[in-house]
Structure formats: structure tokens, C-alpha cells
Image (cartoon, rainbow, N blue to C red):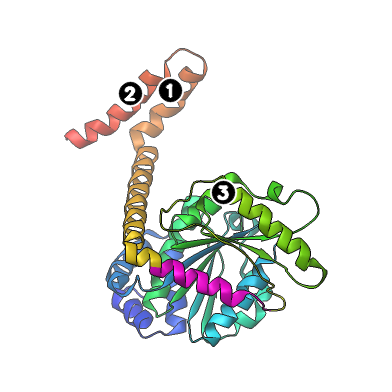
Amino acid sequence: MQKDPSYYIQGVLDTNRLMLARTITLVESILPTHQEIAKHVINELLPHTGKAVRLGITGVPGAGKSTFIESFGTMLTGLGHRVAVLAIDPSSTRSGGSILGDKTRMEKLAVNDMAFIRPSPSGGSLGGVARKTRETMLICEAAGFDVIIVETVGVGQSETTVASMVDFFLVLQISGAGDELQGIKKGVLEVADAIVVNKADGDNVTRAKLAKRQYETALHLVTPSSPNWSPPVMTCSALEETGLMDVWNTIVSHKKIMTASGELDKKRQDQAMSWMWFLVNEGLERWFYNHQEIQKILPGIKESVENGRMAPTRAADELVSILGKDLLF
């Protein structure tokens, strides 16, 4: 792998797809030498980022998320946009990644010259996956992609993680038998900028309209995250490619409103600061667990706490004081 950062920087700025893929591979590498080069590359590319629409998409199982992203992404490329699709899937570490899955479930978009699909990196944890996806997003922006779609594939905290790195968070739902609201978590409603009921086609149109009304009622019970935006509920059919332009117009409208109010800039600033502190805490934690003296005494202290011979507060003080000695000398 090349050691000269300018090799990657120029390749990305030249919108070379091969170099884009190589740069992302560099960022995803766990080798310390690669990570050092990657930090320099990201920092140099930073002035060329920030112009894209950052869109997060999540959805309940069976909501037709892959079909939606493919139809939506294809429509956007038809409008002249360059679309990058990134995935956040913490389970990819256990399953060995989802390269084939991402390429086969979005066949049309995968061969579209105006689109770029990158499967979820294996990060060992949600934080690890998120770190690499954030950096990949910046690389894609520097390469001229003006719509970045970050898709949640996993479960748990991945929705809020994606919401913390995008401008607009779209929640994909479907209508079905029984209570529509059972399949949606309150935490997801709180970060949603719009809810889209997919599969509003054929015999399902009436049920989709009913589900739309139920979600609208549910959103009234949640305090909007912005005083300038009330999350709408829409219906669409990714299969029949209807309602997709309404979704895009909503995202464009949201960006205009948030930009005019100054909220978009503030949101991105807050996201950047939040990410910085996350990395600081991650670095401190890594320093702590890699510290030779702590590795030596930690098993004994853990045993003392577990057996009730040492209070957790005293144990924590003793461990932290070891790091303090390093700072004094």
C-alpha cells in the first residue's frame, strides 16, 4: 500500500473510482501505519467536504429498504446527482461482512456510473463501524458525491448512531396487519425527520393510507427536535417508483429551512464536536487498557471488587491514579 498521502488525496479529488475505493480501504485498515496516513488524508480532504446532502435511512425488517434505496438512488442519478450508499451494520463483524449482499440487493445502482456502494466495514463494535463510516462519508464528499445515503442494517443503537452523523433521518415503514406502531421505537420517532410508508401499491394502498394516519398521530406525541421542522409522514411505492420525488422534495425543503435558520451549520458543528469527544474518550480508554502496570494489577483489583473486599470507588481511584503518575513524570 502506498505511503504517500498525496497519492490518495489527488486520486480522490480527481474523482477516480479506483482511488476512492483504495482510500476507503486505507481508512478501514487497522494497521497503525495505515491509520497515520489515513488521518493526514482525511485532514487534507476536509476543505473539500460539507456540500453534500447527508441522508440517513432506517427501516423495520420487510420495509423494502434495499428496493427503496435502489429506486430512490436511481431517480437521483437521473436528476444529475452523484449518490454514495454506505452501510452501518455492527453484525457484519460476526457474519464476515456484507459485500455480496450489498452488491446483489442493489443490482441496478451497483453498475450505475453516478453511484457508489460501499458495504459496512467490520469494526468490532458499533463505534468502530461508525468511525470508519464517518470518514468514508467525508472521502465520498471530497470525490464529488453530492448525496450520501447512510443505511442502518443492524439493530440496537445503530439508528441513533446514524442520526448523529446525517442532516436528515428518514424512517421507512410499512403497513400490515395489527397495530402499526408496535414496530417502531419511541427513540427512532424522536430522531426521525420524516416517516415514509413504503409498499403503497396494489391492494395495499388503503392500508398504507391508514398507517400514514396512525404514524401522524404518533408523531404528535413526540416533541420535534427542531422548532422549524415538523416531521411529515408520506407514502410511496419503491416497486412502482411512485412518491419518490415527494420524498426528495421534502429533503430539499428541509435543507433550505435548516440552512436559512442556521440550524444545519449548528447541527454539523455539534456533530463534529460530539465526534471529537467520542474519539478522545476512546483514546483514553485504549491508553488505560494498554497500560502495562494497569494490565498487571487489574485482575487482582477486579477480583477484590467482585468479592466485596474493595469498594468500587477506591478501585477506580487506584486505577486512575496510575495514569496520573504518567502525566506527572
Q: Is residue 5 above or below residue 318?
A: below
Is any atom of residue 106 visible in this view? yes
Q: How crowded is the residue under tag 2: few (<14 C-alpha within 10 Å), some, or many (20+)?
A: some
**Residue 318 - label:** 2
Give the label, 2 or 3, closer to the camera: 3
Residue 248 coordinates in the image, percent (x, y): 53, 74
Do tag 1 and tag 2 residues touch (Cβ < 8 Å)?
A: yes
Rendering quarter of residue 295: top left
Query: What type is the residue that disc 1 sits on?
Result: Ile
N-terminal label among 1 and 3: 3
N-terminal label among 2 and 3: 3
Please provide the residue range marked out in magenta: 241-256
Q: What residue is rendered at 39% in x and 66% in y?
A: 257
Give the label, 1 or 3, closer to the camera: 3
Query: What type is the residue that disc 2 sits on?
Result: Glu
> What secondary structure is marked by label 2?
helix
Please identify the dominant SS of the magenta region: helix
Position of the C terminus, as image quadrant, is: top left
Query: Is 149 in the magenta?
Result: no
Rendering quarter of residue 240: bottom right
Query: What type is the residue that disc 3 sits on?
Result: His
> What secondary structure is marked by label 3?
helix
Residue 173 coordinates in the image, percent (x, y): 67, 59
Q: Look at mark 1 in the image and give the residue it sits on.
A: 301
